[in-house]
Image (cartoon, grey):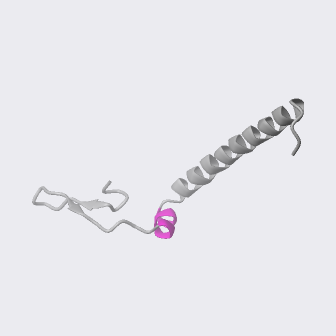
Amino acid sequence: MKTVELIDFPEKGYYVPLVPLDEEAFYQAFPAAWELYQKNYQRCEKRKQAGRDRMQQWRLAKGYTE
């Protein structure tokens, strides 16, 4: 949490919540997170499209029209 600038831990031994980065600033500060997000998003989109394709094939096989 401290490394992503969500909290501060001063010498007195308590946590201080900080204002989180906005999305753009976060991904600029942590480009690996952006790459991972894009990879997972693309994987999810491919799975959704595969499901749509399977449903379309099933409908065609059962004689349903588009």
Magenta span contains residue 47: no
Q: Could you tell me which residue is drawn at 86 percent across and 37 percent down?
A: 64
Give percent across and percent down for residue 58: 82, 32
In terms of depth relative to the viewer, which is nearer, 45 or 8? 45
Q: Could you tell me which residue is drawn at 40 percent across and 67 percent down?
A: 21
**The N terminus lies in quadrant:** bottom left
Q: Is residue 10 left or right of residue 27?
A: left
| Vertical side of 5 occupied by 46: above or below | above
In terms of depth relative to the viewer, which is nearer, 53 or 63? 63
Q: Main secondary structure of the magenta part?
A: helix
Give percent across and percent down for residue 42: 67, 49
Identity of the residue furthest to the front in this view: 64
Q: Could you tell me which residue is drawn at 51 percent across and 69 percent down?
A: 24
Give percent across and percent down for residue 30: 48, 60
Q: Quadrant of residue 7?
A: bottom left
Q: Is residue 56 left or right of residue 37?
A: right
Residue bounds of the magenta highlight: 23-29
Q: Quadrant of residue 34?
A: bottom right
Give percent across and percent down for residue 25: 47, 69
